[in-house]
Structures are given as C-alpha cells and as structure tokens.
Amino acid sequence: MLNAQTIKEYAYSLGFDAARITSAAAFPETKQIIQERIGRGLMDGLPWFTAERAEISCHPDALLPEAQSIITLALCYLTEQPEAPDKREPHGSISRYAWGDDYHDIIKPKLQQFASWLKDYARDQGGNEVETRLFVDTGRMVDRAVAQRAGLGWYGKNTNILTKGWGSWVFLAEIVTNLPLASDEPLKASCGSCEICLHACPTGALPNPYELDSRKCISFLTIELRGSIPVEMRPLMGNLIFGCDICQEVCPVNKVAEKRLGLRDMQGKPIIPLRTIQKHSTEPAMDRDPARKAFQPRSEFQARPTVGSTPELIPLLSLTEEEFRERFRRSPIKRTKRRGFLRNVCVALGNSKDPQAIPALTKALHDDEALVRGHAAWALGSIGGSTARQALYDARQTEQDPEVLKEIRYALSIA
Ligand code: B12
Ligand code: SF4
Ligand code: SF4
C-alpha cells in the first residue's frame, strides 16, 4: 500500500490546506437524505439535481469502476476584507468565494497535476496502473459527505463542512482512485448546542439543523435561479447581489479561524470571536498538518479592484453585455450572466430605498432584458415617491411583455 502521509504531503505542497482519505464505499445514508429532500421539494429550482444523479454521486464505483479510495482536499479562500465602501452611495455585497478568481479554474489544474504525480509515485513504488477521476463542485460527487467521512471536517448545522483551523471557508475537491490507501477516521467534533446560524438566516432557509431549503437560500436566488426572484423573497435579500455568507459569518468556529489567520474586518480592526465561543464545546484546535506552518491568504481569491466585495450599485446598472463579460472574466460572477446580475442589483437597490437610484432604475425600465425591466420596476415601487411612480406610469404605456406589465402593476400598488 502506498504511504498515505507522502500523498498528503504532496497535497500540501500543491497548496491544499487539508487532505484526508476515505474508502470508495457507497454513501447509502447520503443518498437516502438527498432523495428525501428532492421529494420534499427542498432542491427545487436545481433541475439537474435529480434522484438519478444522487444514485451515481453516492456510488463512487459508478464513476470509476475500480474505485478503492477517495482523497479529499480543502483549499481555504479567506483573504483580507477590502476597505469599507463609501456609505453615501448604495452598495451591494458579494459573497467571499466570488471576490477573486473562479475556484474551479484554480483547483482543476492542481488536481490534474496531483493525478499525474500519483501515477508516477505508484509506478516508482512498483504498483499497478493508476486510474483517477477528479472532482470539484460541478462533478457528480457528494463533496461534503466525502469530507465528513474522511475526517476533513464535520457538518455544521448550516450544512457546510467546518474544518479545524479554517472553519467552513474552504472549497472541497476529490480524487477518486483505484489505489488502496489507508483511510482516516471521521472527526468527533460537532456544533454542540449552538444554533446561531439557524437564527441568523434572513430567509428561513435553514428550517432545521443540517437542512437547507434551496428555494429560500439567497445563494440559490442570486446565483442559480435563472428567472424572476419571488416577490416575497426580495425584501429579505438586503444588499446581497451574489451568493450569501450570513450563516458562515456568524459561525463562532469561523470567527476563530479568521482570528487565528490574523484577518481584519472592513474597519481594519482585527476580527474578535463572538463571546459565545469561549464556552463553545467545539472550539477547534489548530490543524496539525505539518506542511502548513503559516497561512498566506491567496492572491487569486483577494478581492479584485474591478469586482470588490461591496461594489457601488448604481454604476453596475449601466453595464453593457460586453462590459459585463470583460469585468467578470475568470470570476464566478459570470455564471449569472448580465441579466441575472442586474436583476440582483435592482433588488438590492430597491432594498436600499435610496432615491439616488431612481434615474438609473428608470433607464433600466427600458433595458433589452425583460428580467431586468421587471426587477427595475419592483425596485422603483419599493423606493416609492412621485418620481418613481411617474417612471412606472410612463413605462406602463409602452411595455409589451405581460410579465413586466405585471411587475409594473405590482410596483405601482406599493410605490
Ligand atoms: C447544490 C449546491 C448548492 C445549492 C443547494 C445546496 C444544498 N441544498 O445542498 C445552493 C446553490 C443553494 C448552494 C449554496 C451554497 N454553496 Co453549494 N453546492 C452545491 C453542490 C453542487 C451539491 C450539494 C449537495 O449535494 N446538496 C444535497 C444536500 C442534501 O446535501 P448536504 O447539504 O450536504 O446534506 C447533508 C447534511 O444535511 C447531512 N445531514 C443530514 N442530517 C444530518 C444530521 C446530523 C446530526 C449531521 C451531523 C448531518 C446531517 O447529511 C446530508 C447528506 O450528506 C456542492 C458541490 C458538490 N458536488 O457536492 C456545493 C457546495 C456544497 N457548495 C459550497 C458553497 C461554498 C456554497 C455557499 C457557501 C456559496 C455562497 N457563499 O453563496 C452556499 C452555502 C449555502 C448553505 N448554507 O449550505 C461548497 C461548500 C464547502 C463547505 N465548506 O462545505 C461546496 C461543497 C462546493 C465546493 N466544492 O466547495 N450550493
Ligand atoms: S447562505 Fe444565506 S440564505 Fe442561504 S442558508 Fe445561509 S444565511 Fe440562509
Ligand atoms: S453557527 Fe453554530 S450551529 Fe451553525 S455551523 Fe457554526 S457552530 Fe454550527
């Protein structure tokens, strides 16, 4: 059997922050939970997330027939918060994972390099031909269930995997292989009696511990949802325009990780863990992985000047298709396309109630995309006042799209 420690050390040398190994045995409980959640509609809106997909993703041998082991990897994406935005202008908020480059593009080449090293290493040790399948997020693999079984981290009640040392601020990835490798044990850590995240979620998307209702999750509404955002959800979304970190930001385990790494908040002050952590049963010890003596925030995940973490909202409304593509090239934000992103910006502007946004929203009422026009109408209705109402009356005269007309009528009823 190949030396598992040598394999983990290679993972650290590639820049992964934690590496663990589990067998490629099936995940029957995970499959049951996923199928039950699909049945209850909790995964609605993700049409690709089917019972058939769960069947495959919970059986590693369906992905690699000779599968014996899974190497599970975590890469921390914590970086410094950029400066606080100018409070006089309405600004949005982008979730941390999207401040910098797209993590899929960063992690995939590392996995490919890892697989090729693994083949060489096994050959040098006189082993058989090595087969691998590589996964990061988009593949048919249950990233979090693998990480939990391998002891990379434990399930938080917000459903994210919490790691020792980096909290849940990690991306997960896996290498499934036909190599027999020594497995690690699951961790004994748990959230204990803490339920802070469940109460912090603004939309009630965490109805029970370890259970997420995707339909209510702002991450789903701002990134995955292609169409109109349900009207009742919009006021709950605040200024979040891409993803949501609220249930992670409030997590005491994450606060400890941020403090340990010496990160500062938007006011430039060191991050202090919540008082509750003092008596919290699961305060994590530092990860003992030998190769990571000091954490260096990765420049790839640092907020870019062109994207930032809290961009001013009004200028975003005038982005053309080409400018959108240019600005968000290599960023996760390109996933929403311009129309989805501007839809989110309209909702955030509506929630800002700031009359400064009225001229830009009035212009957006005539955008080429019906989705943007409809949400601009809602935002104007939400800000209210005579100028906003007049813009809505004018648009009602010329608008042809029945969905947008419905939005305008609704906006006039609340303006
Ligand atoms: C679909 C998806 C989403 C969807 C739906 C999420 C959902 N309902 O699971 C949406 C778009 C909403 C989403 C949002 C986010 N996502 Co996402 N997403 C995924 C994806 C592709 C599949 C997740 C999945 O299988 N869900 C099915 C559900 C049933 O699985 P589960 O939540 O893990 O359920 C387990 C627990 O409930 C547990 N459980 C159940 N009962 C009990 C009881 C006890 C006592 C215990 C201990 C456990 C337990 O067992 C279940 C099965 O294993 C994965 C990548 C992948 N290929 O796995 C990324 C992934 C989960 N996402 C990720 C991230 C970063 C996010 C966001 C933080 C992004 C953001 N900032 O906006 C948010 C977080 C929202 C949240 N609170 O979880 C990371 C999570 C990293 C981590 N540290 O855990 C992943 C792993 C991507 C990656 N490779 O890094 N995501
Ligand atoms: S990501 Fe936001 S909306 Fe989704 S569960 Fe967490 S706090 Fe709630
Ligand atoms: S906030 Fe509390 S309950 Fe939620 S994931 Fe963190 S430790 Fe667990």
Image: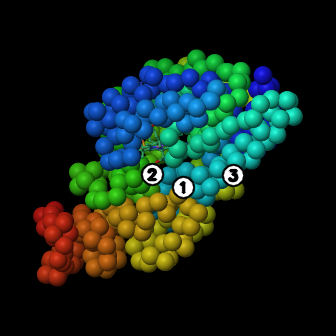
**Residue behind label 1 places its C-beta within 8 angstroms of ligand 1:** yes
Q: CA distance from mark 3 to mark 1?
A: 19 Å
Give the colouring mode of the picture.
Answer: rainbow
Q: CA distance from mark 2 to mark 1?
A: 8 Å
Q: CA distance from mark 3 to mark 2?
A: 25 Å
**Which residue is disc 2 drawn over?**
243
**Which residue is disc 3 drawn over?**
109
Dot 3, how many residues are within 10 Å of its Cα: few (below 14), some (14-19), or many (20+)? few
First reached walking from the N terminus: tag 2 or tag 1 = 1
Q: Is residue 79 above or below residue 311?
A: above
Q: Position of residue 319 (x, y in %)?
A: 44, 76
Where the C terminus falls, by quadrant? bottom left
Q: Is residue 169 left or right of residue 364?
A: right
Q: Position of residue 100 (x, y in %)?
A: 60, 58
Which of the two marks, 3 or 1, is nearer to us in this view? 3
In this orientation, does residue 62 appear? yes
Q: Secondary structure at mark 1?
A: helix
